[in-house]
Image (cartoon, rainbow, N blue to C red):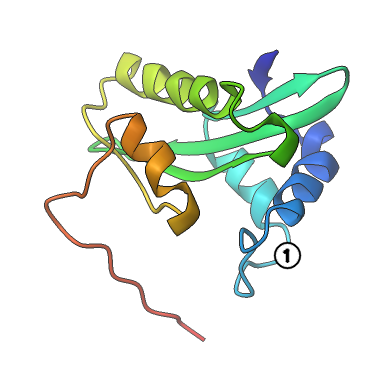
């Protein structure tokens, strides 16, 4: 079942993120997932089955574009449509708010999944700089 994420889900969401190799980055601050949910303004969702969270997505509406900050699906739930339904939910919510574009930085091992959902390279490139 797809539903809004809440603080009650934090422990399971963090465990899910930690179960996906390479997902959590060294530079994430303490409380980053909690803050992301707080700042999502209703764009953070979980996929739950029998009280187990098998998927999590978090996005943000910046007015001029939407940004998908994280998508993670439990290994045993992959290939069952969980990720697709989470992404489509965020896309529909952003479109209903008037966003016409969504961007996301995608882990290399998820590139084909997103290409299958019609995501492609943007007209600009994504650059980053570590501040510490």
Position above or below: 27 against 104:
below
Q: Nearer the viewer, residue 6 or 113?
A: 113
Quick one: 12 or 117, which is closer to the camera?
A: 117
- As helix, strand or loop, the secondary structure at mark 1 comes to loop
Lateral position of residue 13 relative to residue 59, left or right: right
Left or right position of 125 against 24: left
Quarter of the rendering occupied by the N terminus: top right
- Vertically, is 117 above or below 108? above
- Residue at the image position 49 percent from the left and 54 percent from the top: 109
- Residue at 32% x, 38% y is 115
Q: Nearer the viewer, residue 62 or 89?
A: 89
x then y, percent, for residue 68: 43, 41
> Which one is nearer the viewer's eye here, 91 or 114?
114
Give neighbour class at mark 1: few <14, some 14-19, many 20+ (Cα, 10 Å): few
| Residue visible at 52% across and 31% down in the picture | 41
Q: Position of residue 14 (x, y in %)?
A: 77, 49
Q: Please give the name of the residue rendered at 81% of the width and 49% of the height, measured from the top-left corner.
A: 15
Instruction: Find residue 6 and report its image quarter.
Output: top right
Give the quarter of the image for residue 80.
top right
Count of labels in the image: 1
Viewer can see residue 131:
yes
Which residue is outermost to the bottom? 132
- Tell me if I can see residue 61 in this picture: no
Q: Is residue 125 above or below residue 117?
A: below
Tag 1 residue: 30
Q: Left or right of 23: which side holds 40? A: left
């Amino acid at each position: 079942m797809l539903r809004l994420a809440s603080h009650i889900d934090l422990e399971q969401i963090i465990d899910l993120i930690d179960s996906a190799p390479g997902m959590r980055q060294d530079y994430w601050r303490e409380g980053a997932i909690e803050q992301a949910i707080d700042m999502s303004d209703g764009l953070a969702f979980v996929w739950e089955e029998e009280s187990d969270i098998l998927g999590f997505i978090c996005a943000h509406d910046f007015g001029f574009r939407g940004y998908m900050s994280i998508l993670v699906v439990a290994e045993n739930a992959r290939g069952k449509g969980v990720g697709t339904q989470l992404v489509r939910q965020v896309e529909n919510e952003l479109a209903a708010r008037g966003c016409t574009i969504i961007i996301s930085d995608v882990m290399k091992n998820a590139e084909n999944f997103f290409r299958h959902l019609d995501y492609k390279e943007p007209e600009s490139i994504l650059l980053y700089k570590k501040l510490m």
